[in-house]
Amino acid sequence: MYRQWRECTKAIIADRQPKYKKHKKITEEYIDFARRQLHGNPELAKAYMNNHGIIKMRDDFLASRGLKGVDIIAREQQEGDVAPTDVSHDLVIVPVATLGCGKTTVALGLCKLFGWGHIQNDNITVKKGKPAAFASACCKELESYPAMIADRNNHQKRERKQIIEDVSKIVPHAHFVAMEYSHDRSNYERIRAATRERVLGRGDNHQTIQAASKGPGEIIGIMEGFMERFEPVDIENSPDDGFDTFIKLDPTADSRDNLEVVISQLYTEFPKLFQNHEMPSSHDMDMAIQAALNDYQVDIKHEIKGRDDRRNKQNKQQMNGQADAANGKQKPRGVEFFAVQLPATRVYAILDAIFRDTDPETAHMYTTLRQQRRVQTEFHVTLIHKAMANEHAEHWGRLLDMHNQAAQSEQSPLQPEPKLGACKVRLERLVWDERLMAFVVRLAPVDGSNEQFTTVNQTAHVTVGTASPDIKPVESNHLLARWLQEGSGSTGIKEIPVKGNVELEGTVKAVLSKR
């Protein structure tokens, strides 16, 4: 709470809108107090920004109210405004996804492990007022279960606004978690490949998408519509600031991996929800996903149709274009760069483990990247970018030949970026400044192979995230060059060695340019 007050005060001084999610009522009172203290007192503001007078400002506010920190917490608990770590019931998990991400599989896995409630939007059969009926059904589940999953795509802000507002009308102190399957535009080709494979492979065992009855082209057109309309969670602004926390998932990852990410974060954020029960074992999670995949059968089926003739025409044109590409009639996209792609869920877990036991100051950059959704949704080691093709013609030519041969042998529209090989990536050190963060890595052949992939960059690395959209991942090269020359510490660069022999197996692929 005190840390939140400090950040709000600095935002006021910088003429920014203070952002806060916890301890809302008392924080609003504190902000009013801070504004009055700072008004017409530039020296106080200057000192505060230099970290002088922070405790005095806080203590003066508490003294003006005749309160202590423990009194505030007690009052909030009495009024039902509890911190996430104290939440033990009325938790609504809101998936944010498109078709084929695996949201229902993960939801069923959670229900299998914890016995939570689960409402699927497609089981709501009313003809009018379906969103309100869905929210009402979710609230009904909270009468019997401490947590429930509001299972629909929720891929647009209006849907998330509706579920948060309608549930809160009935359950005023409900807590909401966004379970977002990240849809980074740069990762759309891999998301398309993964989700289409799942949807087309499950046939008619889905409530709205019966792939065995409809043609693949029609299904793909529907899926494209959802991806076009996807609006990512923006935790800093309405309506997504209504979420207590959000969990970032990889739509291309296995549901078993995503289930573990969800459970791990829920245990961290909401420990009292689990009533001191130990976290499920790997075997427990394996069995839960197996049951979700094998036992699930739909009872109610609907049909999704195009909204209008124009949308249907667009989908048909898009499908024809994809068919032309598969038949070699459309000009193939060029290679943007070659990279070793790493499993995102493993990288997220490693990052969390690195910062779990560090002090807040050390973890500040990573915490900020997570809170502002600036951690990458996919991780890779760039081997060579097309901008370096002339300078390193032999290196580029060898990888391009491998890509062309692999593309000719696969010839699959679902796999536009075929695998060229595999590579071990050892994570050695994490380096960052106030602009970005990156792993320093070492590349090695996989067991049983002599194929050594190398990078043309001075230092092999994996960009973790950048502080703002205008800072491009390529700037990792500049950071690491400065780190090699100047070191860390007083230079403004920080570093942490990665403990143990942390080695991941990556997939070598070409990343194609956008059309």
Image: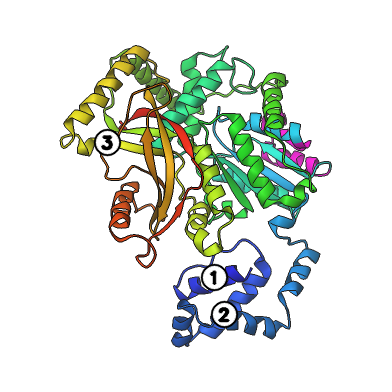
Residue under pointer 2: 34
- Residue at left offset 42%, top offset 49%: 429
Numbered circle sitting on residue 384:
3
Residue 196 drawn at (x, y percent): 50, 22
Q: Can residue 127 be seen in this view?
A: no
Q: Nearer the viewer, residue 234 or 218?
A: 234
In the image, is 303 to the left or to the right of 308?
Answer: right
Q: Do the residues labelled 2 and 1 touch (CB within 8 Å)?
A: yes
Residue 16 drawn at (x, y percent): 47, 69
**SS category of the residue bearing label 1:** helix
Residue under pointer 1: 8
- Residue 3 is covered by the magenta coloring: no
| Quadrant hosting residue 494 | bottom left
Against 126, is 208 above or below?
Answer: above
Amino acid type at mark 2: Ala
Distance from Cα at disc 3 to Cα at disc 2: 52 Å
**SS category of the residue bearing label 2:** helix
Return the disc, 2 or 1, that comes first in the chain's sequence.
Answer: 1
**SS category of the residue bearing label 3:** strand
Return the disc, 1 or 3, that comes first in the chain's sequence.
Answer: 1
Residue 143 drawn at (x, y percent): 83, 44
Distance from Cα at disc 1 to Cα at disc 3: 43 Å
Against 257, is 476 above or below?
Answer: below
Quarter of the image where the N terminus is located: bottom right
Q: Give the range drawn in magenta.
A: 114-143
In the image, is 401 to the left or to the right of 447?
Answer: left
Amino acid type at mark 1: Cys
| Quadrant hosting residue 104 | top right
Q: Nearer the viewer, mark 1 or mark 3?
A: 3
Q: Which residue lies furthest to the right in this view?
A: 144
